[in-house]
Image (spheres, grey):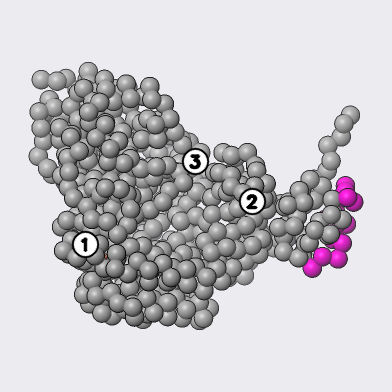
Amino acid sequence: MTDPETLSVTIVDGYVDEPAHFGVPPYISTYPRYTAGALVDAGVPREGITYHTIDGLRDEPDRWRDVDEADLLCYLGGMTVPGKYVGGTPAEPDEVRKLAWTASGTSLMGGPVKFGVGDENAGATETERQDLDFDFVAKGDVEAAVYDLVESGLEGFSNRMRDVDEVSRWAQEGAFIVEQHPNHPDHLIAELETSRGCAYRCSFCTEPLYGNPTFRPPPSVVGEVDALSDLGVRHFRIGRQADILAYGGDGEAPNPDALRSLYGGIREVAPDLETLHLDNMNPITIVEWPEKSREGIRIIAEHNTPGDTAAFGLESADPLVQEENNLNVTAEECFEAVKIVNEEAGWRPGGPDDPNGPEEGVPTRLPKLLPGINLLHGLKGEREETYERNLEFLHRVYDEGYMLRRVNIRQVMSFDGTDMSETGAEIANEHKKLFKRYKTQVREEIDNPMLARVAPLGTVLPNVHLEYHQDGKTFGRQLGTYPLLVGIPGERPLGETIDVAVVDHGYRSVTGVPYPLDLNDASMDELTTIPGIGSSTAGNIVVNRPYDSVADAEFGSEVDLEGFATIRPLERAD
Ligand code: SF4
């Protein structure tokens, strides 16, 4: 019998990315936190639990010793949606195998990796289930497997799911693991789970494999936020659910009271939080229960932070594709849902539509909550017309004056257990050329003008985290759900956080200058990035320094510099 008190456990986070669950840095998914909590609940002391990310292992090879020497290695990973990431690189199958070979103790693998593994982490691929040489693969919940495995003296476990009491306990008890994440405390977002499962059965989706929705009651989620907040976490994303509007209801209809307890409770235990965003919202819920949904959306917009996105899984505007894949929302219904979210939550804090009243002198901020549209390609029944219908839908939204925060276009990954497993990646591969052309069209005709509407000139994005340099510019993003990529002239120190004012728009990114821009210190590059300031005006601004006021530096430019700029007094030498 192995005594839990003496066990050493290493958790390796290879990152997860599921349709409703982010775990690539700056996100930390629920898996390592719940797993750590289950270990503590089973009697393993906190000091016996070591947590590494796969990037942490790559950066410091010495850490592999913790993999080798642990009595129990828990590997967590699995990508069920394709993606490209800046904040971290998910573990590749060969690295996962190496973990199993290195571990001298018992090895267990869990997380969405149980759904299948492709040759690489990419779209338009087929996947298969593999054990990648681990002793055990958790086919149910990995946190339940870990708990039972420790209880059994590392002999084995049954593949079960955990219950609500367990998750409530484990989520709080495992929060301590965040302190071992390389991004802790400032540049880390904790992904929060409010429910699992879905009432619908779209052909490509792994979520129905969790069954009908089950919800974590508000005190369970709020208690977890309280624990995380005590450990210095300031950024949260309520991302792990199929439909936030259905939270705490009968599985389909909204329950605004539950949303109020959830959001109100979070704000109470984490009054200093800096980000509170969400992910998925099902447009069909809005169309079928418009009044309750409007109320729910208002509650969210009252408590969240600006720039929040409600991702809508339209997936296809083509009725044939909808029919063949059991999709639950039509283009017309989705349009109606876009309209309702815009009406209830598309206001900017302190702006003219702010329900609390406009405020003087407040810079333009991003809208509180806007819809995002997910479109998926390679589904059964897809034809050339599908691409036209999707474009038509997006044009209609733009032409009628509504805002979308983001259009997300992907190609299908097929998983065993879903209806798409028979078709696989065949259609996606056949339509590759069509897909490429259409993607460019969406970027040019929709994304670019939409971004100019969502983040007009002068919009201020606070706390942009500077991530990398490219072509003489610095790129960064805010923490949050689908943050905008911001390019800033010049190479600024990485890892810092600055406020930025938007001056130009790309397809999916914006150009910005530090806000407010000190005219006594701004570079030529920064000045000429502001539309309306050419190199001769910028030159005039530079040579006539210093200024006592912004008005002194206006030199007849057409731009209202007051919106961007400031004057900081020059430091005295004495
Ligand atoms: S509505 Fe469809 S795509 Fe969304 S979670 Fe449910 S089954 Fe998946």
Whether residue 73 is situated above or below residue 346 in the rendered picture = above
Tag 3: amino acid: His
| Residue 331 x, y percent position in the rendering | 35, 78
Tag 2: amino acid: Ile
| Residue 247 x, y percent position in the rendering | 30, 60
Frontmost of labels 2 and 3 is 2
Is label 1 in a helix, a strand or a loop?
Answer: loop
Q: Crowding at label 3, few (<14), some or many (≥20) Cα neighbours within 10 Å?
A: some
Range shown magenta: 543-558
Comparing 416 with 440, the one in front is: 440
Residue sitting at x 34%, y 80%: 385
Quick one: label 3 or label 1, which is nearer the N terminus?
A: 3
What is the chief secondary structure element of the magenta stretch? loop
Residue under pointer 1: 424
Quick one: label 2 or label 1, which is nearer the N terminus?
A: 1
Residue 9 forms part of the magenta stretch? no
Tag 1: amino acid: Gly
Quick one: label 2 or label 3, which is nearer the N terminus?
A: 3
Tell whether circle 2 marks a residue whose Cβ is less than 8 angstroms from ligand 1.
Answer: no
Frontmost of labels 3 and 1 is 1
- Looking at the rendering, which quadrant does residue 32 occupy? top left
Residue under pointer 3: 187
Residue sitting at x 68%, y 53%: 513
| Residue 377 x, y percent position in the rendering | 32, 67
Residue under pointer 2: 488
Residue sitting at x 20%, y 46%: 114
Placement of the C terminus among the 4 image quadrants: top right
- Looking at the rendering, which quadrant does residue 56 occupy? top left
